[in-house]
Image (tube, grey):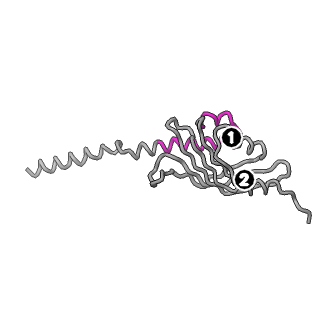
């Protein structure tokens, strides 16, 4: 009888180990990994100024929260115009991502969204001023894996002022 109980216990223990793949968090990890790749691709394309290749990554109904003081959320056309304006007005744009993180919903539960902290640098081609600013970006995705909400947090107004500042004579 002891052997039957031992074999039955061993069978139950081994069969419960096979249920690991049914864990809903593994699907969430896959979703986050896919969304992380999209966010990184979006930045890569931004740095190479390839707006056309960015378009499939962005939901046509995207909502963008720009980093400028007093700005209001914008939709697709405003979002694309803002990106193009940065590309048109700066050279040698870089983003050094210090960390990429999974995002959460309002209850702190991972939801497949992506966050990043990093440092932007860019050069004003008219006067040579180089700006450097710390930044935080958040990406929310639709079921198709497209960016449907993006929030940018950095001192955009201060960065623009520093880029436009004229050199003073000593």
Please, what secondary structure does the residue beneath circle 1 have?
helix
Q: Residues within 10 Å of mark 2 (few under 14, many from 20)?
A: some
Residue 130 lies within the magenta run: no
Residue sitting at 79 percent across and 54 percent down?
Answer: 163
Q: Front-most of 109 and 76?
A: 76
Q: Kindly give the residue lying farthest to the right in the view shown.
A: 169
Residue 48 lies within the magenta run: yes
Q: Front-most of 93 and 61?
A: 61
Q: Residues within 10 Å of mark 1 (few under 14, many from 20)?
A: some
Give percent across and percent down for residue 110.
Answer: 46, 50
Give percent across and percent down for residue 79.
Answer: 66, 41
Q: In the image, which is nearer the foreground, mark 1 or mark 2?
A: 1
Disc tally is 2
Please, what secondary structure does the residue beneath circle 2 have?
strand
Give the magenta-colored segment's residue range: 31-58
Secondary structure mostly seen in magenta is helix
Residue sitting at 68 percent across and 50 percent down?
Answer: 71
Residue 110 in the image: above or below residue 48 = below
Give percent across and percent down for residue 31.
Answer: 47, 42
Give percent across and percent down for residue 41.
Answer: 61, 41
Residue sitting at 63 percent across and 50 percent down?
Answer: 152
Q: Front-most of 6 and 122?
A: 122
Label drawn at residue 78: 1
Dot 1 or dot 2, earlier in sequence? 1
Q: Which residue is mark 2?
A: 121
Horizontal relation, residue 131 to residue 110: left or right: right
Horizontal relation, residue 132 to residue 170: left or right: left
């Amino acid at each position: 009888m002891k052997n039957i109980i031992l074999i039955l216990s061993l069978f139950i223990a081994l069969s419960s180990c096979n249920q690991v793949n049914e864990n809903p968090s593994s699907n969430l990890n896959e979703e986050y990994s896919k969304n992380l790749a999209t966010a990184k691709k979006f930045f890569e394309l931004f740095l190479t100024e390839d707006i056309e290749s960015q378009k499939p990554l962005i939901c046509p109904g995207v909502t963008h929260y720009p980093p400028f003081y007093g700005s209001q959320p914008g939709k697709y056309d405003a979002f694309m115009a803002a990106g193009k304006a940065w590309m048109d007005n700066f050279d040698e744009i870089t983003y050094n991502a210090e960390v990429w993180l999974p995002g959460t919903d309002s209850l702190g539960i991972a939801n497949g969204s992506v966050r990043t902290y990093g440092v932007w640098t860019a050069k004003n081609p008219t006067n040579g001023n180089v700006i450097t600013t710390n930044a935080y970006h958040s990406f929310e995705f639709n079921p198709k894996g497209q960016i449907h909400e993006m929030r940018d947090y950095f001192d955009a107004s201060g960065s623009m002022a520093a880029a436009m500042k004229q050199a003073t004579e000593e």
